[in-house]
Amino acid sequence: MNSLAAPATTLAGPEQTAAELAAHVVGEAVWAPSVHNTQPWWFSVDSGGLSLYADPARRLAAADPDGREMLISCGAALFTARLTLRAAGRVPWAQILPDPAQPLLVAQLNWERGPGATGYERRLSAQVRLRRTHRGGFDPLPLDQKLLVTLQESASRYGAVLLVISDEGTRAVLAEAVQAAERTLELDSAHARELAAWTSPPGSSRADGVPATAYPARAERTFPYFPSRDFARGRDWGLPPLSTLPGRSAGVVCLLATSSDEPADWVNAGQALQRILLTNAAWGVATALHSQPFELGARHDLVGLWPGLHPQLLLRLGTTVQTAASVRRPPGSVLFTAGGEPVGLAAAGREAG
Ligand SMILES: Cc1cc2nc3c(=O)[nH]c(=O)nc-3n(C[C@H](O)[C@H](O)[C@H](O)COP(=O)(O)O)c2cc1C
């Protein structure tokens, strides 16, 4: 299926059909994070492996005109698929954006039988369904330096860079950038309509978008103040507050960046992101994400702060109690045979705490 020298494909062992293994992999991959939980992906399976496609119908037209966030989300799903294959005793390899004639074909994924997963991979794999995006502040506790180094190594595996912003002045500049962007996004009708289309009321049975179980009803203030997106938009939606403190720590602020800014870099930034998020989760550390400033062209304004680097996403890390839950579309609705038939499977997407 490709011209790269690669080991022969063994899609599934005798105890598992190709469709069963693919269904298992996709059943995990759908738990990757995606902007507004758009889940902008679908997969096809054939005897040669799995193909991951971006779904442009789920791209955010106002917030993400060039599909950057869509491809970061697909990269996170790709990392999750590869990790799941490792946990299933396979050695995967991926070709990213292999066919210029098919720009929506994000990756082709093949694998062969190999040594079992490492303990580290198993710990990450165990977090795939448990990890949740955090929206709010953190306990005022420092994070282990070893974790931060591990996260930076995670980013560099995919050609990305994770900058830990410890300087108070730069933290304040980034907080201001998020505040200004959040204000602008709330007042912009196209962005506000788009956010409304991807949020659902309490009790909704929708399997995509941001449910009311995913954010606090009253936005938590942080020092410095990194406002969350206003998913509730003035309504009484969201989780009861966990903390009555007037303000909590913003946590460790990090910038995920790449040295070039092409679609393949966005996919790789997504792979790095998911490795970072799962590593944090395995260490008991929660992560908040902020892409507001990067949805208004301000991404390039920040380039001046870090010459030669293209900012992709802001992360805040820390310890806290998390009660958020999210939703996913069932894997059967995003996995097809090469002929376009849905691959039936039992492991439907369900609410995860
Ligand atoms: C590229 C990208 C950008 C995101 N931007 C934000 C953001 O600005 N604010 C936020 O609260 N969550 C953000 N998220 C997190 C998603 O909203 C979240 O992954 C999705 O709702 C699914 O929830 P989960 O991560 O808890 O499974 C982003 C995720 C991705 C992949």
Image (cartoon, rainbow, N blue to C red):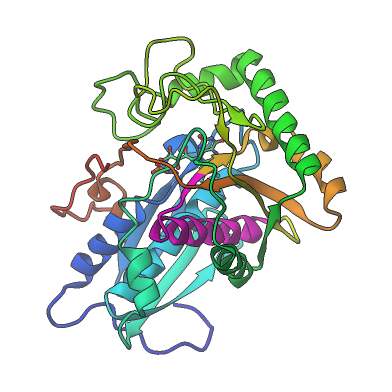
Residue stretch in magenta: 262-287
**Relative side of 160 to 198, left or right:** right
Magenta stretch contains residue 263: yes
- Magenta stretch, main secondary structure, is helix
Q: Quadrant of the N terminus?
A: bottom left
For residue 156, which quarter of the picture?
Answer: bottom right
Q: Nearer the viewer, residue 259 or 227?
A: 227
For residue 244, which quarter of the picture?
Answer: top left
Q: Residue at x 50, y 33 (%)?
A: 136
Residue 202, given in percent of the width and then of the height, sits at 29, 19
Q: Residue at x 44, y 47 (%)?
A: 33
Q: Nearer the viewer, residue 234 or 262?
A: 234
For residue 191, which quarter of the picture?
Answer: top right
Please say if 128 is above or below 296: below
Q: Residue at x 72, y 51 (%)?
A: 166
Judge whether residue 50 can be spotted in this image: no
Q: Nearer the viewer, residue 312 or 7?
A: 312
Residue 95, given in percent of the width and then of the height, sits at 52, 72
Q: Quadrant of the C terminus?
A: top left
**Relative side of 310 to 313, left or right:** right
Residue 173, given in percent of the width and then of the height, sits at 78, 36
Residue 93, given in percent of the width and then of the height, sits at 45, 77
Q: Residue at x 64, y 24 (%)?
A: 182
Please say if 202 is above or below 250: above
Q: Nearer the viewer, residue 279 or 38?
A: 279
Magenta stretch contains residue 279: yes
